[in-house]
Amino acid sequence: MYKLLLSWRYLKTRFIALASIVSVTLGVATLIVVNSVMAGFVEEMKSRLHGVLSDVEMSAPLLGEIRHPERHIEMVKEVVGEDLQDLTCVVRTPALISFQYGSVPQTQQILLLGIDDETFGKVTDFRPYLTNALKRESRFSFELENSGYEIDEAGWDYRRRVITNRRAIEESYQRYQSFRKEQDQGYEIAAATYNQSLQSNEESDEVQSSPDEDLDENADLITDEFVDNSNSINFIPIPDSIPEMDELDSSKPGTSSKKLTSDSADGLYRLDPFDPSSQYRPKLAEEDLFDPMKDQYTGIILGHAISSRKTHDVDGNLVDFYMVKPGDDVQVMLASVGNNARPVSANCTVVDFYSSKMHEYDSSFAFMPLSELQNIRGMVDPLTGEGTVSTIQIKLKEGADLDRIRDQLLATFPTEIYGYDIRTWQDTQRPLLHAVNLELTILNILLFLIIAVAGFGILATFYMIVVEKTKDIGILKALGAPSRGVMAIFLGYGMSLGTVGTGVGISIGLLFVHYINDIADWVGKITGQEIFDPQFYYFSKIPTIVSPTMVLGVAVGAILIAVCASVLPALRAARLHPVKALSYE
């Protein structure tokens, strides 16, 4: 009992003990805050990395193909067995996207993915990262929506307004060009009239001044001959427009003007004077023509960072500045497949944004329908109608062994035969994950050194106490206290310092983690600089995860350091001889 009483007395009366407690408290609180924030970052990063990557992926080379994907899917199902949850086929190819922002053309390199809108969302966490609420929550399609977008100007209303304004500008420009043309023609006519009048005046002067009368006689003969011959020539005036076919046919003998006109009974055919085969071509109805006011091109979903940039408004707030929005048209340029690859292009309409908050993905990924991309790249067999793909992505059930299934697929599809690249999502991101784990390990070691410094402070403090209390230790031993009892006093003292410091540190650390975003905003207002800038981190808030195992490990480690720091002073106190201790000056 005396051991606890003495330990408690030293803890209350010693000011230097308070300094040791503060050192342990700060070290523990720092460890908890840093580990919680790092765990939040790592978990958020893994979630977003895994969000667009399937559990296991079997892919051909970058511009290669997996032929007969249906047969490959059957073989994958046989290999994976009950662990298979779902799978999907994807076409992946590098491409260029081009769009017009104002009068400046913009071109950017992207990674274009052709996906199946029914199965891709079952294999990856694709839909939660879409910005349109209707596509994200209720139904997904590559169609432009009327509402549900996070930005104000987007969708069909925005598209129709842009097209109306563009047509008005083009009409104004055409009117201006017509006006300028009429002005130029007026200037040319006036100049020609003026030059003709000058020329006639000069000719009249020459006729009056010429003494040779034979010139007038020859001129009269030439004029009379031209007039006589002109009566036998039929001049056909140049038409102002292309004549209708009934007018052309009516001039031919034996041809009825009602034979192939636009007013035929079926109304399907109409001859073109410049296309002899026009009678065999169906006439397009007005509703079959592409009208951008009510029609769209192939839908495409762009990564958020492809179409937007971070900037500050007049109030200094960070906002997104959009160069292209849902409803705008873009052009995609890519290479076709096969030995004779050639550049191909297609017009697309932006229907939504993909925002995973991972800059690597948001600045490069673009998605469009699988069948459309296969047709554009020439990946469909014209005889069988079967398309090829670039990747087969596999989703496994919870708890499945990814490495084991990867090895089984490698044994079924040997690389030296098929040339496929089969890997898990962890294999794909292994360098990044390894770097993050190494950073977290080193950071924990460095932060534990803070508690180790506090431990050296406890060691120095206890040595001073042993020297100061040498006579008291001698009295305790003279009264019958064993060496173990004296040693237990200092060990208990060290444990109490570690326990109190650890408890206070855990409380402060957990409280700081709970209000970390509020604290970051408060510090940002004081310093005038944003502590957690989404422009660089792409998180709206600081992610945190508090692990009970981590908290327990930090607490045990801090207490052990405090106890270990008190071992040497306790051993010295326990080895003191009572006589020498009482005679110590």
Image (cartoon, rainbow, N blue to C red):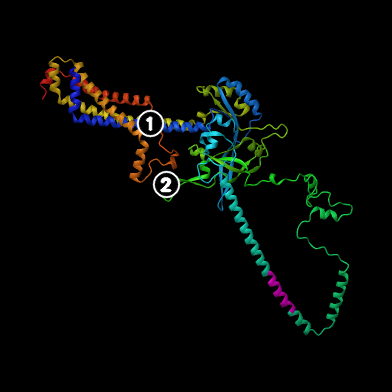
Quick one: label 2, few (<14), some, or many (20+) residues within 10 Å? few
Quick one: label 1, few (<14), some, or many (20+) residues within 10 Å? many
* Front-most of residues 561 and 287: 287
Residue under label 2, please give it.
Answer: 317
The reply to whether residue 187 is in sight is yes
- Please state if 41 lies on the left or on the right of 411 as rendered: left
* Picture layout, residue 302 above or below residue 119: below
From the image, give the main secondary structure of the stretch colored magenta: helix
- Amino acid type assigned to the residue bearing label 1 in the image: Ser
Instruction: Point out residue 326 in the picture as x, y percentages from the top left corner.
Output: 56, 43
- Amino acid type assigned to the residue bearing label 2 in the image: Asn
Instruction: Point out residue 456 in the picture as x, y percentages from the top left corner.
Output: 26, 29
> Which quarter of the image is occupied by the C terminus?
top left
- Please state if 388 lies on the left or on the right of 83 as rendered: right
Sooner in the amino-acid sequence: mark 2 or mark 1 = 1
Instruction: Point out residue 49 in the picture as x, y percentages from the top left corner.
Output: 49, 33
* Front-most of residues 511 and 287: 287
Q: Secondary structure at mark 2?
A: loop
Where on the picture, by quarter, is residue 215?
bottom right
* Picture layout, residue 572 above or below residue 348: above
Q: Secondary structure at mark 1?
A: helix
- Please state if 492 lies on the left or on the right of 121 as rendered: left
* Front-most of residues 432 and 13: 13
Q: Magenta stretch: give its range.
A: 188-200
Is 196 inside the magenta-drawn segment? yes
Distance between the Cα atoms at labels 2 and 1? 28 Å
Eye-nearest disc, 2 or 1: 2
Instruction: Point out residue 150 in the picture as x, y percentages from the top left corner.
Output: 50, 41
Residue under label 1, please give it.
Answer: 36
* Picture layout, residue 311 above or below residue 13: below
